[in-house]
Image: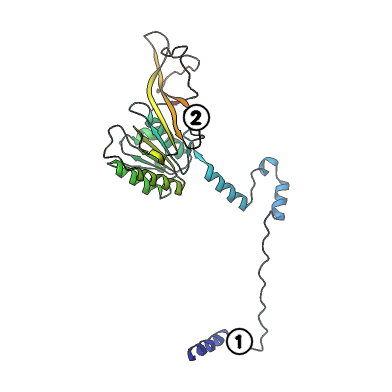
Amino acid sequence: MAAPARNLDWQFQLLDLDPSRPAPRLVPPPPPVEPGESDALRQLRAALDPVILSKVRSGAELLRHTANTERSSTLPTTLDAVDALLGGGLPRGKMVELVARRGAGRFSIVLSALVAATTMGEAVALIDLGDHFDPQLAEANGVDLRRLLWVRPRTVKDAVMSAEMITATGFQLVVVDMGLHPLRGRRAPDAAWVRLGRTAEAHGAAMLVSSPYPLTGTASEAVLKGYGSRPKWIGRGKSPRLLAGIEMSLTLEKHRHLKPGSRTKVTFAAPDSVVEPSSRPVDEAPSARRLDDSTTRRLP
């Protein structure tokens, strides 16, 4: 019992209590802050223009608004037809798979998503298994290379592992391009795609998987399937005619919140081409079935 007494004496000596000095006055804790706007904020709102007033928020409102926006926001591809199929664009925290064969324009959609994301100031990662990315061509079409991480794996397994590690570091858009058939290396197991989808959901990253045939299975939020492209001509007759671009058809094969089966088309215009919206390509019959929507994008 001697040790506690010595400690107690030492504490009194350290405080240097003097009975002749007035006792220290305790400061009461501040009153609790009631929820709601303060008088200053109400006065500020009353003095502002209605247009500006609609955009002024308190700190708590701003935090709630930011959280709600992040939960429901999407990352547009700037292709109106593609964004319409997906309900606004690539959903953050979800995986979207784009399936199309050689020459259908699949990588053009990938390039458009890279342009849109880097233009918005987002950090983007491209897992380029097919080795199709051309930095000079991408920069000429609007990709900000300062915001792009380019990864060139050797196998499908390396591509999935790279995407998972990079997504966990905070990239807002991760694009996995598997290249053309046949893929290099064996297919990744379904568990790897499920784990990759959960990583995107945990970190709020939008993920686009571009492949020649379905790979992600149940891990994807939506699946877009592209059909063979066809040339789009201006003029009549066999010769001469002008090439206006290449038309790609897309179908929403799967979506967890939207009804699948919607169809659209995307036209990639050739450089320096003369586009006449009122003209009908000669290879399209008058009774041909028209698709739901269309978007025109210049080819590099």
Is residue 170 depicted above or below 32 in this figure? Answer: above
Residue closest to the eye, 112 or 286: 286
Residue at 49%, 18% in the rendered image? 277
Tell me which corner region of the image, top left, top right, bottom left or bottom right, holds residue 155.
top left
Q: Residues within 10 Å of mark 1 (few under 14, many from 20)?
A: few
Q: Secondary structure at mark 1?
A: loop
Q: Which mark is residue 264?
A: none
Instruction: Give the residue at mark 1.
Output: 17
- Residue 29 in the image: state x and y as whole percent: 66, 69
For the residues bearing labels 1 and 2, Cβ distance under 8 angstroms: no
| Disc 1 to disc 2, C-alpha distance | 77 Å
Place of residue 26 in the rendered image (x, y in percent of width and height, measured from the top left): 66, 76
Q: Position of residue 32 (x, y in %)?
A: 67, 63
For the residue pair 48 and 198, the one nearer the viewer reads as: 198
Task: Please name whichever residue, 52 or 57, is drawn nearer the observer in this view of the structure.
Answer: 57
| Amino acid type shown at disc 2 | Asp
Q: Nearer the viewer, mark 1 or mark 2?
A: 2
> Is 214 situated left or right of 205 in this image?
left
- Give the amino acid at mark 1: Leu
Q: Which residue is mark 2?
A: 80
Q: Quadrant of the C terminus?
A: top left
Looking at the image, residue 121 sits to the left or right of residue 105; the answer is right
Secondary element under disc 2, as helix, strand or loop, is: helix
Q: Residues within 10 Å of mark 2 (few under 14, many from 20)?
A: some
Farthest-out residue, bottom? 2
Q: Earlier in the sequence, mark 1 or mark 2?
A: 1
Residue drawn at the location 57% of the way across and 84% of the way down:
15
Depicted 245 relative to depicted 219: above or below: above
Residue 171 position in % (x across, y down):
42, 46
